[in-house]
Amino acid sequence: MATTKEYRDFIVEQLHILEPITCRPMMGEYLLYYDNILFGGIYNNQLLIKRVEGNKKYNLPEVIPYKGAKAMYFIEESSFQDQLKNIILDTCKDLPPKKKKS
């Protein structure tokens, strides 16, 4: 099941607390970048972020976004107002920026 545009718009609205957020389509789903750092995506109407050392402290549930993929952390909607900004910032601290094409 692909992510709906309505759910994508909802997530992007929730992420307004961080700038610059970029949402890029990929095969019916969406990749999410913060300041050119790929930190997660929207898969099957779920907000998922990469697992890194800096976000383990949040004890988030793990989800496999698609067959053959690595497990990612699922961000429940109840976390949006309380911890979303901190979770994303802590995740991005442990990830490299996107390489620029030459």
Image (cartoon, helix red, strand yellow):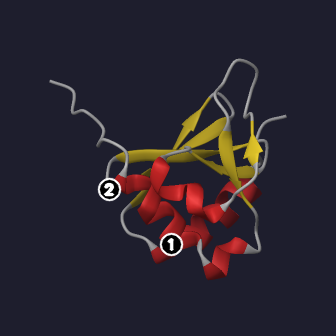
- Which residue is identified by label 1? 85
22 or 73: which is nearer to us? Answer: 73
* Quarter the N terminus occupies: top right
Say what amino acid the circle numbered 1 marks: Lys
Which of the two discs, 2 and 1, sits closer to the camera?
1
Query: Residue 76: which quarter of the image?
Result: bottom right
Q: Confirm whether residue 22 shows in the render.
A: no
Q: Residue at x 58, y 70 (%)?
A: 84
Residue found farthest to the right: 1
Q: How far apart are the two marked residues, 2 and 1, measured between alpha carbons?
A: 13 Å
Q: Amino acid at mark 2?
A: Asp
Label 2–label 1 contact, CB within 8 A: no
Residue 9 shows which numbered tag? none
Residue found at the very far bottom of the displayed protein? 82
Return the x and y of residue 20 as percentages of the image width and height: 36, 63
**Residue 16's spot in the image, x, y percent?**
50, 73
Q: Earlier in the sequence, mark 2 or mark 1?
A: 2
